[in-house]
Image: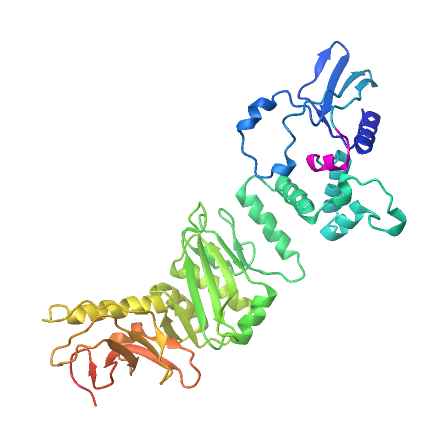
Amino acid sequence: MANFQIWLEAESSSTFTFFRKLNGNLVRGNKIFHYYSCQFYNPYYQSRSTLCFRNKKEVIPVSLNCPVRINVCEEKGLVSATYYPIHNHHTGFHNTKYQRFKDSTRNLIKSYLLLSFPIVEIQNLIRGNVGFRRHRSFVPSKEAFISRRSIRTYYRRLQNSVRPEKDTLSVMCNVERLKAEEYNPILLFKPQNFKTLYGPPGLDALLNSDKSFALGIQTETQKEMLIKHSYKIICIDSTHDTNRYGFYLLSIHIQDEYGQGYPVAHFICNYLDYDTLVTLFNSLKCRISNLRVYKDMTDDDNVCYTAFNSVFGPNLNHLLFEELMLDSVLSSLNTLVAGIQGAVNVKTNPLRIDPHSGRRQLHVKEGLRLPGSEFSHPATLIKGNSNARHQRLLREYDLGSPKAIISIDWIRWIDGSDMADLTGNHLV
């Protein structure tokens, strides 16, 4: 059958026809019969009229029912074929848009991909000398117009075909592949039901060691950015339920030279307790032992800050995310004015920068009436000294020098006529 396949591909190229093999083989004694038809043979075309196709130009016309056939008989290694070559339609190059690539071409692409050839190089090899002046009179073929997108599709299918079925084995293979790169980005790897395979072995001593999973990744660029900007602030955030197993994604960010957040490390784990977080942060410290950290920002979870402070501390300046600070501010304001005659609920706009002072301010939409004050104008939170009661509500903004710290100790009416604290006492 190999010689027959070679002849079939040559006939397909010369006639711009794709011969489709009908499903099933007929076996009679020592003979095996194979049946091929033209790509425009469609005996059931009437049922296709109700289907919706996304790309009309590549749909075989349903009005054609080409009678071309090739009946093949295989017996004891010998092949005989009966060919009915008369088409009822035009056979030209425009028919190639309905065709797929030849089996030999697809096998060649897969071979190049397995040998790690670049996609652009594979495209040039498949096309050959298409476009050269000496080949202007060549007969075009489907392969002459192969795109990089088609090659990437074969690459994706090839990767999926060799990927392990079990997630555990698949993750291990990916980790080993990353470790084999020129720069090893793996900070920590501890699969379930295994000891720690890479990084600090702190998770092995925990009670939930068998069930715990942890994977830490940091690229070379992320490492350089962390070393360069760690002195500003370290932001730590966790995302829940990142996959069907309910794992957490713990991300570490810094503020780059443009004032934007930049991720510098990622951890995937299924526990976020104190001991687990200490091990995760230790893996980062093992990679960069002399990291300069002065301030960190987390959500309203004290466990994360405590674990980070125990590794990179002591006595780090702890800040909260803006959204949590605003929620706490509004809750405190509403609590303090609750039950006071004439007080209303507090609703705010997002923080904005005062064009005159350059400070970030929280503008209150509705009036806030305090006891002992005749003012009912919208209020603005301004820079003020913090105390222990409001230490958790601080939020720092990089506004140049000096930095502005917003607390809820003071409020100021927008007209600037007076200042009052939350107890209603007027301040000088």
Left or right? Give the position of 88 relative to 128: left
Measured along the vertical axis of the image, is residue 289 above or below residue 165?
below
Residue 162 within the segment the image draws in magenta: no
Measured along the vertical axis of the image, is residue 408 above or below residue 183?
below
Q: Write down the region rendered in magenta.
A: 90-99
Measured along the vertical axis of the image, is residue 145 above or below residue 26?
below
Identity of the residue furthest to the bottom in this view: 428
- Dividing the image into 4 quarters, which one contains the N terminus? top right
- Dividing the image into 4 quarters, which one contains the C terminus? bottom left
State the residue in front, 427 or 273: 427
Q: What residue lies at 56% left-to-right and 62% top-to-bottom?
A: 218
Residue 93 within the segment the image draws in magenta: yes
Relative image position of residue 137 (x, y in whole percent) = 87, 44
State the residue in front, 205 or 424: 424
Left or right? Give the position of 421 relative to 94: left
Residue 408: image quadrant is bottom left
Relative image position of residue 268 (x, y in whole percent) = 48, 55
Q: What residue lies at 34% left-to-right and 66% top-to-bottom?
A: 323
Relative image position of residue 24 (x, y in whole percent) = 67, 19
Left or right? Give the position of 155 relative to 330: right
Relative image position of residue 258 (x, y in whole percent) = 51, 74
Residue 22: image quadrant is top right
Magenta span: predominant SS is: helix
Residue 154: image quadrant is top right
Measured along the vertical axis of the image, is residue 15 above or below residue 28?
below
State the residue in front, 287 or 344: 344
